[in-house]
Image: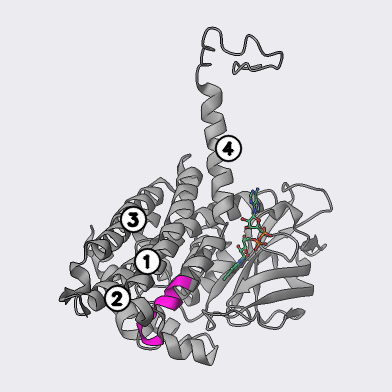
Amino acid sequence: MSAKLETILAAARDHARDVILPNVDAWNANKAWPRSASDKAGEAGLTGLYAPEELGGQGLSLSEGIQVYEQLGLGDGAYAFALSMHNICTFAGCGYGTDAFKAKWARDLTSGRKLANFALTEPQSGSDPMKMYTRATINGDGTWTISGSKAWVSLASEADIYFTVVKTSDAPGHKDMAMIAIPADAPGISFGPRYDTPSYNFLPLAEMYFNEVVVSEENIILPIGQGLQGSLMAIDIARVSIASGCCGLMQAALDTALSYSKNRKMFGGKNIELDGIQWMLGEVATDLEVSRLLYRKAAEALGTPEGPLMAAHAKRFVPDAAVKAANTCTQVLGGMGLLQPYGLDRLSRLAQMLRIVDGTTEISRVVIGRALQKRAAGLPDLPVPKGYGESDMRDTSVAAE
Ligand SMILES: Cc1cc2nc3c(=O)[nH]c(=O)nc-3n(C[C@H](O)[C@H](O)[C@H](O)COP(=O)(O)OP(=O)(O)OC[C@H]3O[C@@H](n4cnc5c(N)ncnc54)[C@H](O)[C@@H]3O)c2cc1C
């Protein structure tokens, strides 16, 4: 591990311990994004992970930077998620943005002075982005006029710029899709009422409306034709980042259970001495080890042809393991596991949320299923056992048609 990565991971761990954990319950009670905390994350180098050093970033590779969310996830998975989306947008802006965009925005984004988020989902299109409507019309002077609405926008009305996926024609399909960065103060932008979530209340979520919003062509991040493909790459990074954050969540749940269990007296000994409790905690520990290996392997694969499949494996497995870990650890504490100060209920709700965001567990299964179909097509046909199905008039053949 490079010295730089070690420093950043230590900064993320300190940020979780000193900034997130002591305050997260108050943030949730206040229902407001903790801007002073994300400012501190910026000062600690956590908001420009993959951006080049000459633009104020840390210059880490994806596989290095993604490990930061495991540390932040020790504090809170929703906070880690929001910073991961900011980092992905910053990576896109610093990597694919125009020179004019970089001159105007790059240093503010890498320093965390300004926050970015990604807007793809619409009320009628979540898992199926091909149903997107938000439309950009290209004007004679090169500016784009955008009308439409997005849903489930994180950091709604808090971010300073939204990396928005738009269609540029009425043609069905994705060949006309592009991504454009829309500043929050552009005339014609408004937000719906905040969604009422049962937890992670400090993360503002709402719909976002574009009423003939005019944006300079300097803000085009992915040109026409690359909007969907580029977004899918961004989502792959997000999926692995979520798996990384889930590992922090699992570690936090496990450590809470261990801290409690080692002192809880029962049946003449301690809770942790019971075989049944050790088996429960042992399963969590194994799932955590597997999850860590999986997300790190998936992070290494990003940008290669294996990237989307590995990201799907990580997003399918790890948040499910986190749900199981948070619930198991709650169970280990008995009734005490339900009480506020231990935070296990918060971890359970976060883990469930992380199963949905950036492509649900089921969509990951769809991606894996398609890869398996391709593999099946390349495998030899199995011979049908002699005599099998001969008395049946239905077609029982397993051979390829
Ligand atoms: C906390 C939070 C923050 C978010 N932040 C953002 C953000 O900042 N920007 C953004 O663009 N989006 C954001 N999202 C949206 C998120 O990415 C979507 O919620 C997600 O893609 C699922 O879409 P949906 O909610 O519309 O569910 P739907 O697409 O309506 O799916 C409903 C159900 O059907 C299942 N399903 C769908 N297709 C299949 C299939 N082929 N086979 C089997 N089951 C299937 C799904 O898994 C799900 O269980 C956020 C969501 C959450 C919860």
Q: Secondary structure at mark 1?
A: helix
Distance in Å between CA atoms under marks 1 and 3: 12 Å
User: Is there a contact, CB below 8 Å, between mark 1 and mark 4?
Assistant: no
Residue at the image position 42 percent from the left and 69 percent from the top: 48
Left or right of 31? Residue 66 is left
Sequence order check, earlier mark of 1 and 3 = 3
Q: Which residues are magenta?
A: 340-348
Q: Nearer the viewer, mark 3 or mark 4?
A: 3
To which quarter of the image does residue 98 belong?
bottom right
| Numbered label attached to residue 256 | 2
Could you say which is closer to the camera, residue 296 or residue 260? Answer: 260
| Numbered label attached to residue 287 | 3
Q: Nearer the viewer, mark 2 or mark 4?
A: 2
Query: Regarding ligand 1, which quadrant of the image does it lie in?
Result: bottom right
Sequence order check, earlier mark of 1 and 2 = 2
> Hey, what amino acid is under mark 2?
Thr
Left or right of 113? Residue 72 is left
> Hey, what amino acid is under mark 3?
Asp
Q: Nearer the viewer, mark 1 or mark 3?
A: 1
Measured as percent of width and height from the top left, residue 101 is found at: 58, 68
Q: Is mark 2 within 8 Å of ligand 1?
A: no
